[in-house]
């Protein structure tokens, strides 16, 4: 299918979802504000702008600050596109590309023009989705971010259209180019900062374009789950490297982690073991009904690794039940992925709202939904040596079952995370990440 046909199919599907959402919440139209960059306190500088994800769901335009979308069932969506007259910055070009034919595009330069422009299209019972509801007030819109509407939209946004999957595949290809360059830069003995720069260069993304800040962790730094610094000097001994770094294409994210050992040592064997278990779990996805079951199954696999590597001498089931594995894998197995790196709706019980809370034993689990075709999510098991959590384990009744001397030898490596992005299809599972690595590495 050509790019514009694929995009039109996406807009048609999003339109159908909005038609149902608006009918249920008793609105006859919706105004979606893209938003504007947040300013710092007592400063004239701004944070990187991320548009309202509901706006992004419809509009792939690179420039979207201060833009609006109005949709009423049965009519083409209207894009109010802000093209300010500005000599401090380069004003955005008029919208162009395969996606523009899906919209009625109204260009405006001055904010003052906007209310009248919007009023000319607006229905009676309109909902507003966005920050800064002053404009909604000016337009007489009472219904601002109504929960029934948002719950329905969030629930359905988890299922991706073929266009969205194409965007995530493209984001993945970018990220994989960065990952391969970063791996080589690590192997050449460079610092976290230099590895980060190599990633940006090879993935051809500036820092502000990343879906989330790169996690570039050498040695013990890999034990901080969201390690946030980039040391400028390489460590005196290079042992391990964890890279959690993504890509973005038309506002859709890839979220990928790989871990390497500097030597062919036991830590390398442990990475290979986790890789094998992660792949085996992904192959089993069609057999599971819900994501928490997958998460639990992964804990059993982690327990098996801990036993095999002679780190814990307990039966795997007991290790999981008594929270021993939690100390080595304290985060959730994964999350929905899409416009947001941690896409919304992971805890929604149904399109009518309600919550499926994470199991008490796994409070950090971001995804509790039933597994169904169209969902895109991450599978990102980890096995870490986190001093704070190991100390707690040392104080616990299970301390005698742990081989502390061996754990000590692994602590210098920080930890492992292996993160792939997968799509449930009608016939099985597509692994965007493995496919992109295989394509990039094939001769
Ligand atoms: N990069 C953040 C995460 O993996 O969830
Ligand atoms: Mn992730
Ligand atoms: Mn990640």
Image (cartoon, rainbow, N blue to C red):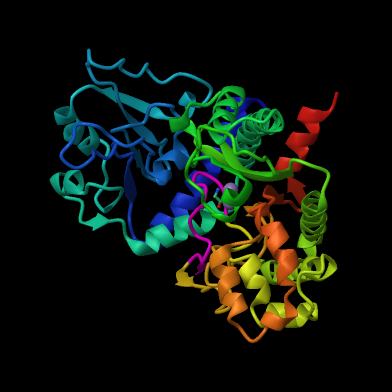
Regarding residue 319, the answer to whether it shows in the image is yes
Q: Which of the image's four quarters has the C terminus?
A: top right
Q: Is residue 341 magenta?
A: yes
Is 397 or 131 nearer to us in this picture?
A: 397
Is 34 or 329 nearer to us in this picture?
A: 329
Q: Which of the 4 image quadrants contains residue 164?
A: top right
Is 182 or 41 nearer to us in this picture?
A: 182
User: Magenta segment, principal secondary structure?
Assistant: loop
Give percent across and percent down for residue 317: 76, 80
Q: Is residue 109 left or right of residue 359?
A: left
Classify 172 as above or below 428.
Answer: above
Give percent across and percent down for residue 102: 48, 30
Q: Residue at x 16, y 46 (%)?
A: 134
Span shown in magenta: 336-351
Q: Is residue 422 left or right of residue 351?
A: right
Q: Which of the 4 image quadrants contains residue 162?
A: top right
Give percent across and percent down for residue 256: 63, 44
Q: Is residue 191 left or right of residue 239?
A: left
Give percent across and percent down for residue 141: 20, 51
Q: Is residue 295 magenta?
A: no
Classify 166 as above or below 139.
Answer: above
Q: Which of the image's four quarters has the N terminus?
A: top right
Is 285 or 370 nearer to us in this picture?
A: 285
Regarding residue 427, the answer to whether it shows in the image is no
Q: Residue at x 76, y 74 (%)?
A: 312
Q: How many numbered discs, if any?
A: 0
Given the current orientation, which residue lies at the most extreme bottom position? Answer: 397
Q: Is residue 267 left or right of residue 352?
A: right
């Amino acid at each position: 299918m050509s790019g514009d046909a694929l995009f039109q199919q996406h807009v048609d599907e999003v339109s159908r979802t909005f038609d149902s959402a608006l009918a249920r919440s008793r609105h006859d139209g919706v105004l979606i504000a893209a938003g504007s960059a947040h300013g710092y306190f007592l400063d004239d500088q701004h944070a990187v702008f991320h548009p309202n994800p509901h706006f992004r769901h419809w509009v792939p335009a690179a420039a979207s600050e201060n833009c609006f979308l109005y949709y009423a069932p049965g009519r083409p969506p209207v894009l109010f596109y802000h093209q300010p007259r500005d000599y401090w910055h380069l004003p955005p070009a008029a919208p162009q590309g395969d996606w523009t034919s899906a919209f009625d595009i109204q260009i405006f330069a001055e904010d003052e023009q906007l209310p009248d422009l919007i009023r000319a299209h607006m229905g009676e019972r309109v909902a507003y989705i966005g920050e800064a509801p002053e404009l909604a007030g000016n337009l007489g819109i009472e219904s601002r971010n109504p929960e029934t509407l948002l719950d329905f939209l969030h629930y359905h946004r988890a299922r991706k259209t073929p266009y969205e999957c194409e965007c995530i595949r493209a984001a993945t290809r970018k990220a994989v180019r960065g990952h391969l360059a970063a791996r080589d830069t690590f192997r050449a003995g460079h610092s976290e900062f230099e590895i980060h720069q190599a990633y940006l260069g090879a993935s051809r993304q500036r820092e502000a374009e990343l879906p989330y800040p790169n996690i570039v962790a050498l040695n013990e730094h890999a034990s901080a789950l969201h390690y946030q610094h980039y040391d400028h000097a390489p460590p005196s001994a290079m042992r391990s490297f964890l890279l959690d770094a993504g890509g973005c294409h038309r506002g859709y994210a890839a979220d990928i982690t790989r871990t390497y050992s500097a030597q062919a040592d036991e830590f390398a064997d442990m990475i290979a073991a986790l890789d094998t278990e992660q792949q085996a779990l992904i192959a089993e996805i069609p057999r599971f009904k819900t994501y928490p079951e997958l998460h639990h199954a992964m804990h059993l696999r982690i327990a098996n690794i801990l036993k095999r590597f002679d780190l814990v001498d307990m039966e795997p089931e007991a290790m999981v039940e008594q929270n021993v594995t939690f100390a080595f894998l304290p985060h959730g197995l994964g999350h929905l992925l899409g416009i947001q790196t941690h896409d919304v709706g992971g805890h929604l019980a149904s399109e009518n709202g309600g919550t499926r809370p994470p199991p008490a034993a796994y409070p950090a689990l971001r995804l509790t939904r039933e597994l169904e075709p169209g969902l895109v999510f991450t599978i990102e098991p980890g096995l870490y040596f986190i001093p704070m959590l190991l100390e707690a384990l040392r104080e616990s009744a299970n301390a005698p079952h742990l081989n502390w001397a061996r754990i000590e030898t692994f602590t210098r490596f920080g930890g492992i995370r292996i993160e792939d992005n997968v799509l449930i299809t009608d016939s099985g599972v597509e692994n965007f990440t493995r496919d992109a690595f295989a394509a990039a590495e094939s001769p």
